[in-house]
Amino acid sequence: MSKLSKYFETHRDADGVFRMHVALDGYALLRLAPTNKGTAFTQEERRRLGLDGLLPPRVSTLDEQIERSYAGFVKEPTDLAKYTYLRAVQERNETLYYALLERHLPEMLPIIYTPTVGDAVRQYSNIYQSARGISVSTINIDHADEVLANVHYDDIRMIVATDSSAILGIGDQGFGGVAISIGKLALYTAGGGVSPYRCLPVGLDVGTERADLLNEPRYLGVRQKRLRGAEYFAFMDRFVDAVRKRYPEAVLQWEDLSKDTAFSVLERYRKKLPSFNDDIQGTGAVALAGVLSACRLRGDAIRDQRFVILGAGAGGAGVAWELVRGMQRDGLSHDEAMSRMFLIDSKGLVSEDRPMEEYKRPFAKSRDVVARVGSTLEEVVARAKPTALLGLSGQPGTFTETIVRNMARNSERPIVFALSNPTSSCEAQPVDIVRWTDGRAIVSTGSPFAPVEHGGKMIEIGQGNNAFIFPGLGYGAILAKATEITEAMVTSAAMALADYTAAHQAGSGLIYPPVTELREVAAHVAARVIAQAFADGVARSSTIKPDDALSYARSKMWQAKYLEFVRG
């Protein structure tokens, strides 16, 4: 049910068939993305609904509309133009948009998500066309309840919210980061089966430090410096309270918050409403899954690895924690797992004898360790002899030839994950990693890269894409009606992804599944998350049996298809 339910509502009729019941007719039906079928309205529907003569005479099928829309997509000259084209389809006809995505997901994922979405964020104020989601800003936060009340849908279950302070590898983007929320939710639907009418993108505009944005006449955000400290958290408190009142069953995904606030926001609100931070936990889970798959290819175990992580922001620390949990699940004690983890930030190896943010402190090494292994990335790789090197620094070219060749000396099949996004921020090019290790490295990146030819064979480059984790994690939490998203639920999502890859890609050499299987991956991840929610005592659902969670998750996924329209 929704505010719009007086105009349209989908439900199963007495004969068991789902239909769209509408109180609108004529142009109004064609102007609302949820009710617009365009040329797919049948002749009978056109007569009943006041559409006769308002559309071209020929009735099209959804497949024909997909073909026509795809032809327009491929004609667009640049990736950003393709992004804008798809957003226009989304605002015109949501069913067609998601059917188009599902049909061409491998090609369109890099457009609606990383890396092209980074360009869309940069250009947000220049390419803005129509409203989607809500804007909660310093201008309206004092009446946040009224802002949330303006959302047309009353049963929102998935919210993605960003304050745009740390977008991908491009930093503070002011209000433009809301494009990330829109893109993530598109994947919740196309890849995770969450109904688009249960999703809400949110831009949290607390200001920006970017002078160029503040001075740009076309900038659409609030023109003030970012809120900090107590003022920032007072803003967030009001927003979270408004969400809890309006949408008590919603799951909230925090997106692209700066390292200064990401951990604090997560800990402050995770028990007030079911929420998680994709940059911390989603990135950590997808990295853990990739490492587990790499260990399977190597024939050893995660407890046997030694890790160096370059980049100690939210993503780097999140990956470190998830790998530690993975090692603990594989039999190591906490201290043993931590001894195998070397976290490096812009100042070098994180160590006890210097100031640092609190979230880094558990990974700080003693003076004795620093004296033994050094402080720079090159020193630590040469002396600590890691078997796995992961990059989340946002600094291109930091995995140099010397460093990668040393990794190849440390292990017969070194694990080298250059995970920074977008493509321009990648720590090393896969072709170089493959060449420097004579084809022996197991390589993954954050953005998509083409296979690399080496020694007469093609080597696939795994994409450590959070889209393999967050749609299933959020979907599972929704279905379980979880009161909290526990760390065990996140780790279970990683295990589910690794197990799915092992079961479905055995012998392929892949460490992640193909994007074409994203929806089935989400179902498996959701099922494992549901089971863990029950095990952790945070599931409220009375309709799911944990042993039947996979079939239940599949059965509840939203499908992009047209329904018959009837009056009333």
Image: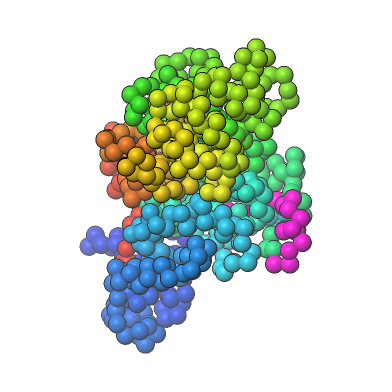
User: Which of 195/385 is in front?
Assistant: 385
User: What residue is rendered at 29% in x and 79% in y?
Assistant: 59
Residue 1, picture quadrant: bottom left
Residue at (43, 54) in percent of width and height:
109
Name the residue rendered at 36%, 22% in the picture: 300
> Is residue 290 visible from the viewing direction of this image?
no
Residue 58 makes an appearance in the image: yes
Q: Please, which residue is most extreme toward the front here?
A: 455
Residue 205: in magenta span:
yes
| Residue 338: percent from left, percent from top | 54, 19
Q: Is residue 359 magenta?
A: no
Q: Quadrant of the C terminus?
A: bottom left
* Percent coordinates x, y for residue 73 in the rendering: 42, 68
Which residue corresponds to the image point at 53% horizontal and 34% vertical from the top-left?
A: 401
Q: Position of residue 144 (x, y in %)?
A: 65, 53
Figure check: 321 above or below 216 = above
